[in-house]
């Protein structure tokens, strides 16, 4: 085997450094589960121009997948930081007596969050949380729990954009047609979130009825699911795209597309001399937009396949 020349060794050294910079440069996914996580967050994570916080259960946490949906959403929105407040096997409402419901930990969300995204309800259905009615305003039912969470988030984070999503359809445990012990279907809980969104002036992204997120067909099982409930990487990307498209009307999509089109037209009509001059311009060193830091919380003793 011939020894590497000095030029090749230099090239490999530069390539290795570039790959290392790329690995370090992804945005942070911060999984927050314990009371002391807020203190750990304060150390070493810079504030960014766009901070996304996702509140949810194991789908948000990323059970059985390396990158949950909010990771891909952050890439699409070019977020500086994504905070993962997902805890497996938890309900949105506290009325069923489950541990760590959304209502007991929403206050841990970072105060500088620009977008707060909430995805839940599938566990409330499975655990038999009383559905209630649109008139409920206290946490005695799912309706009341959603109302309380929406109003508290609005009061605590007045500058953040708050978005709720309806639960995904699932094929495990007999859903979506199966009724829980109270006789309610999962779609009833999806409807409750939509109605509370109208009532509280909160944007709702209806994942339950989104055709792109309906993975219940037999042909979709292996493509988008890990177990009929938790999405795989392909499923998480699909969820992120649906959320992104519903957010884009309020994030200046037309302005972004217009600027890209203008720049493309300028490059198309520039002369050869201009193109040659542009080619000699000093290249800017890419700056990592994000720091990568993962804080793993403690999970309960329930096996993964029992964690919605």
Image (spheres, rainbow, N blue to C red):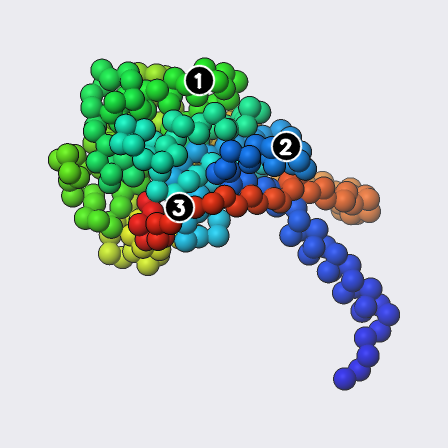
Q: Residue at x 44, y 43 (%)?
A: 61
Residue 140 position within the rendered picture, expressed as x and y whole percent measured from the top left: 25, 22
Mark closer to the chain start, 1 or 2: 2
The answer to whether mark 2 and mark 3 are in CB contact below 8 A is: no
223 vs 182, left or right, is right
Say which mark, if any, is on residue 42.
2
What element does badge 3 sit on? loop
Residue 264 position within the rendered picture, expressed as x and y whole percent measured from the top left: 62, 39
Mark closer to the chain start, 2 or 3: 2
Label 1 neighbour load within 10 Å: few <14, some 14-19, many 20+: some
Q: Residue at x 24, y 25 (%)?
A: 141
Say which mark, if any, is on residue 154.
1
Say which mark, if any, is on residue 300.
3
The residue lying toward the viewer, choosing from 93 and 151, is: 93
Q: CA distance from mark 1 to mark 2?
A: 23 Å
Above/below status of 20 relative to 194: below
The answer to whether mark 1 and mark 2 are in CB contact below 8 A is: no
Residue 178 position within the rendered picture, expressed as x and y whole percent measured from the top left: 16, 43
Say which mark, if any, is on residue 36.
none
Label 2 neighbour load within 10 Å: few <14, some 14-19, many 20+: few
Residue 245 position within the rendered picture, expressed as x and y whole percent measured from the top left: 43, 35
What element does badge 1 sit on? helix
Q: Residue at x 24, y 40 (%)?
A: 126
Q: Is residue 277 visible?
A: no
Q: CA distance from mark 1 to mark 3?
A: 30 Å
Above/below status of 308 relative to 98: below
Q: Residue furthest left?
A: 183
The residue lying toward the viewer, choosing from 209 and 53, is: 53
């Amino acid at each position: 085997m011939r020894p590497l020349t000095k030029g090749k060794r230099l090239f490999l050294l530069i390539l290795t450094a570039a790959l290392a910079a790329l690995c370090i440069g992804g945005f942070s996914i911060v999984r927050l589960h314990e009371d002391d996580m807020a203190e750990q967050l304060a150390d070493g994570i810079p504030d960014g121009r766009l901070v996304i916080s996702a509140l949810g259960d194991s789908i948000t946490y990323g059970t059985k997948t390396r990158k949950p949906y909010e990771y891909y959403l952050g890439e699409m929105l070019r977020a500086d930081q994504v905070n993962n407040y997902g805890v497996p096997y938890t309900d949105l409402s506290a009325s069923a007596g489950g541990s760590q419901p959304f209502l007991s930990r929403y206050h841990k969300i970072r105060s500088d969050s620009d977008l707060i995204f909430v995805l839940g309800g599938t566990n409330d259905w499975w655990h038999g949380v009383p559905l209630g009615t649109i008139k409920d305003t206290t946490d005695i039912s799912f309706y009341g729990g959603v109302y309380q969470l929406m109003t508290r988030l609005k009061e605590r984070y007045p500058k953040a954009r708050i978005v709720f999503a309806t639960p995904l359809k699932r094929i495990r445990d007999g859903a979506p047609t199966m009724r829980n012990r109270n006789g309610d279907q999962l779609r009833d809980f999806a409807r409750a979130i939509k109605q509370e969104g109208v009532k509280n002036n909160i944007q709702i992204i209806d994942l339950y009825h989104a055709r792109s997120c309906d993975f219940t067909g037999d042909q979709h099982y292996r493509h988008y699911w890990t177990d009929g409930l938790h999405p795989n990487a392909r499923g998480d990307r699909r969820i992120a795209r649906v959320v992104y498209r519903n957010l884009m009307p309020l994030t200046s999509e037309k302005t972004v597309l217009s600027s890209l089109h203008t720049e493309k037209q300028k490059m198309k009509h520039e002369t050869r001399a201009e193109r040659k001059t542009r080619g000699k311009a000093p290249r800017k060193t890419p700056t990592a937009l994000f720091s990568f830091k993962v804080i793993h919380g403690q999970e309960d003793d329930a096996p993964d396949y029992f964690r919605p």
